[in-house]
Image (spheres, helix red, strand yellow):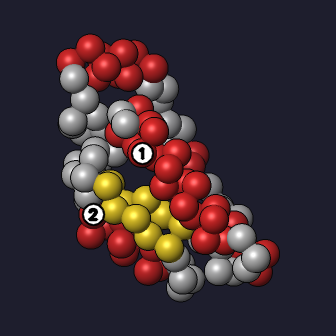
Amino acid sequence: MFAADFDHGLAKKTEQELKPHSSLAFFSPQPPTACSDPAFKDRLAYVVATNDLAVPKDAQYAMIAGTGQEWKIKEVPQSHCAPFKVNLDESVKIMGEFIEAFQGV
């Protein structure tokens, strides 16, 4: 689910690195999101993993829309964890593009 496009060796290594997620994250009161802070106005970015089996593309866009904020969005044809583990150079390039876009805002 998280590493659908990984080669077998990297998928196995990633599986061993995963830690259980605390259920408290789903049932505890949550503070306001950082994206609602005025300091981040016009400085929000999101990388949509279009081949994500854990959080499908439509759900990612729904979460973005649910913030009520404007976002810079870049789509990558990768699975959930791939932007952090596969083709990392591309992810760094995308982050650089976001940072450059936010300069002077």
Q: Earlier in the sequence, mark 2 or mark 1?
A: 2
Q: Quadrant of the C terminus?
A: bottom right
- For the residue carrying disc 2, how many other residues have a C-alpha within 10 Å: few (<14), some (14-19), or many (20+)? some
Relative to 49, is 88 above or below? above
- For the residue carrying disc 1, how many other residues have a C-alpha within 10 Å: few (<14), some (14-19), or many (20+)? few
**Secondary structure type for disc 2:** helix
Q: Quadrant of the N terminus?
A: top left
Query: How much space separates mark 2 and mark 1, taking CA atoms?
Result: 19 Å
> Which residue is nearer to you in this view: 84 or 103?
103
Give the amino acid type for the residue marked by disc 1 in the picture: Glu
Q: Is residue 46 visible?
A: yes
Q: Which residue is mark 2?
A: 57
Q: Position of residue 57 (x, y in %)?
A: 27, 63
**Secondary structure type for disc 1:** helix
Relative to 100, is 10 above or below? above
> Residue visible at 44% across and 70% down?
73
> Which residue is nearer to you in this view: 77 or 96?
96
> Which residue is nearer to you in this view: 30 or 12?
12
Give the amino acid type for the residue marked by disc 2 in the picture: Lys
Q: Which residue is mark 1?
A: 90
Q: In which image quadrant can residue 5 be found? A: top left
Residue 4 appears left or right of 45: left
